[in-house]
Image: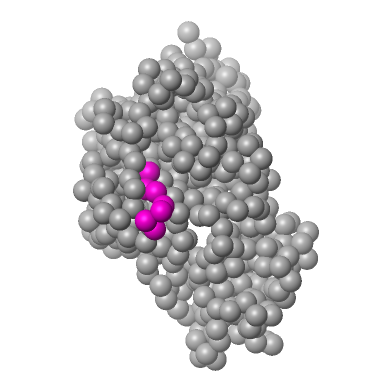
């Protein structure tokens, strides 16, 4: 891809946050941009309209007329898509989004890549905000909605490019992990566990993918790895790139000591400096340690780092308070992996001490829909008092022997002493919660999708009920 040979670019799947943001950035660079998607939702629909990026709803070969100089094919696009098929049949020049980012936006900048099974969105947002608060004005790509920025992607910043390094595959024509395209100078490896069961057969395959990333770190780069994580340990240290460990345990280069967590705050000491973080839980302290080590390496002072920590507002859908009705707090969280579920419930206990906690879980991700975590999920809800599990999403797309068995999960939870129910749909879940919750209760909804707008429906039902007893 030589930019001088390209005048027009078409984005297949332009409605995604990263795809739409890249399309806007390419238009700002002077390219003629078009796009298509099956549906485009806010805020991306509004952003594309504001920047006058033309797009078509629905995929069709005619969207490639006249033929663009380059077609960018999104990660969700599969063989059979009419525009993907036309691109191949007509021998048009095409690439994935990670390739486009590498050649047009990352190359020539200093790339800081945040990886890990859990916490990478929050960590990337925190790192980007720390650099922003210090006046560095970085480019960034965050796989979520950071509250400190109006959008999750910015491609017209200064010398730094801070990017969430996803281990998911790049495109239907490139099954390598996305992060191998990002020309890393520094990699933060938060943690490593088995996930994405639809593309990885086991933990060893994910470790291999991370090895591929670590292998392209330059000799004058840096790997910052969670030294407390046993699954990262076999990959360390690197033979050709400096490696530094961070964590809470002994032997880490950047080690947090005297850690205290209360409410939604944490404090910890690194070396002789005491840091304050507006996030609770040991998991978030480790995330912050990776940011701290990276920022120090890049020349930021501890005072600049603390300024960023103090003003960090988090990421949407990470324990988002969606409302309160009749004394019942309703939270929304993106967690779906057993480790993330357990860590999030630990934070709920810190934020709402002494409250009765309900966990409402939709098995929706490509991994939790499968039975690979059948046993692990039973232990993930230790922080909840009551657990409700819905039907597996997109049930018919999996063979029965592959699926998670929610009713078995309920039996396992009850065997652990939990009050637990399998309720297949949102109306049934809302009805039970509207009748059984008491003032002071906290309902935490876990789903990586919309979950049939359960939050709004539950708050409406709670607000309309009358005559419920007051919790003592």
Q: Which region of the structure is painted magenta?
A: 218-224
**Colouring used for the render:** one colour
Judging depth in this view, the residue of 97 and 65 nearest the camera is: 97
Q: Any magenta on residue 223?
A: yes
Res 181 → quadrant: bottom left
Q: Is residue 349 left or right of residue 82?
A: left
Relative to 64, is 190 above or below?
above
In the rendered image, the vertical position of residue 199 relative to residue 1, given as above or below: above
Residue 48 drawn at (x, y percent): 72, 62
Q: Is residue 28 visible?
A: yes
Residue at 47% from the left image edge and 21% from the top image edge:
273
Q: Residue at x 34, y 41 (%)?
A: 244
**Location of residue 433 with respect to 53 vertically, above or below:** above
Magenta stretch holds residue 360: no
The single residue placed furthest to the front in the displayed view is 220
- Can residue 139 be seen here? The reply is no
Q: Nearer the viewer, residue 96 or 198?
A: 96
> Quarter of the image holding residue 345?
top left
In the image, 352 versus 14, the foreground residue is: 14
User: Can you name the residue that lies furthest to the top here?
Assistant: 472
Q: How many marks?
A: 0
- Where is residue 356 shown, x and y percent of the image? 43, 20
Image height of 151 relative to 83, above or below: above
Quick one: quadrant of the N terminus? bottom right
Measured from the top left, where is residue 118 in percent x and y? 39, 43
Q: Residue at x 43, y 20 (%)?
A: 272
Q: Position of residue 442 (x, y in %)?
A: 49, 24
User: Residue at the location (56% across, 58% down)?
Assistant: 109
């Amino acid at each position: 891809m030589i930019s001088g040979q390209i005048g027009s670019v078409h984005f297949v799947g332009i409605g995604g946050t990263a795809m739409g943001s890249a399309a806007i950035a390419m238009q700002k660079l002077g390219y003629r941009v078009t796009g298509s998607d099956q549906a485009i939702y806010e805020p991306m629909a509004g952003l594309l309209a504001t920047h006058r990026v033309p797009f078509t709803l629905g995929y069709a070969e005619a969207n490639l007329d006249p033929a663009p100089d380059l077609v960018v094919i999104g990660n969700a696009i599969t063989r059979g898509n009419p525009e993907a098929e036309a691109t191949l049949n007509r021998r048009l020049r095409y690439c994935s989004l990670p390739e486009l980012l590498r050649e047009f936006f990352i190359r020539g900048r200093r790339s800081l890549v945040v990886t890990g099974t859990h916490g990478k969105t929050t960590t990337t947002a925190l790192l980007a905000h720390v650099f922003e608060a210090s006046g560095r004005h970085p480019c960034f790509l965050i796989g979520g909605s950071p509250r400190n920025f109006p959008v999750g992607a910015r491609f017209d910043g200064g010398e730094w490019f801070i990017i969430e390094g996803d281990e998911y595959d790049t495109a239907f024509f490139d099954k390598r992990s996305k992060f191998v395209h990002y020309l890393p100078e520094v990699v933060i490896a938060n943690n490593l566990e088995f996930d994405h069961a639809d593309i990885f057969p086991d933990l060893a395959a994910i470790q291999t993918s991370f090895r591929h990333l670590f292998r392209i770190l330059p000799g004058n780069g840096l790997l910052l790895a969670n030294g407390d994580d046993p699954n990262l340990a076999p990959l360390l240290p690197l033979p050709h790139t400096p490696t530094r460990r961070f964590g809470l345990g002994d032997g880490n280069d950047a080690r947090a000591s005297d850690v205290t967590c209360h409410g939604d705050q944490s404090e910890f000491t690194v070396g002789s400096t005491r840091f304050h973080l507006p996030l609770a839980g040991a998991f978030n302290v480790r995330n912050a340690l990776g940011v701290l080590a990276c920022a120090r390496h890049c020349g930021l002072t501890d005072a600049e780092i603390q300024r960023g920590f103090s003003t960090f507002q988090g990421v949407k859908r990470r324990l988002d308070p969606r409302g309160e009705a009749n004394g019942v707090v309703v939270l929304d969280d993106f967690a779906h992996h057993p480790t993330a579920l357990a860590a999030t419930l630990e934070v709920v206990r810190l934020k709402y001490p002494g409250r009765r906690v309900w966990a409402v879980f939709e098995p929706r991700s490509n991994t939790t829909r499968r039975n690979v975590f059948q046993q692990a999920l039973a232990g993930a809800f230790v922080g909840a008092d009551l657990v409700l599990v819905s039907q597996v999403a997109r049930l018919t797309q999996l063979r029965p022997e592959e699926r998670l068995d929610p009713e078995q999960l309920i039996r396992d939870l009850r065997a652990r002493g939990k009050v637990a129910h399998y309720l297949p749909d949102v109306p049934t879940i809302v009805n039970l919660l509207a009748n059984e919750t008491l003032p002071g209760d906290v309902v935490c909804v876990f789903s990586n999708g919309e979950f049939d707008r359960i939050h709004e429906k539950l708050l409406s039902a709670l607000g309309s009920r009358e005559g419920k007893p007051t919790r003592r």
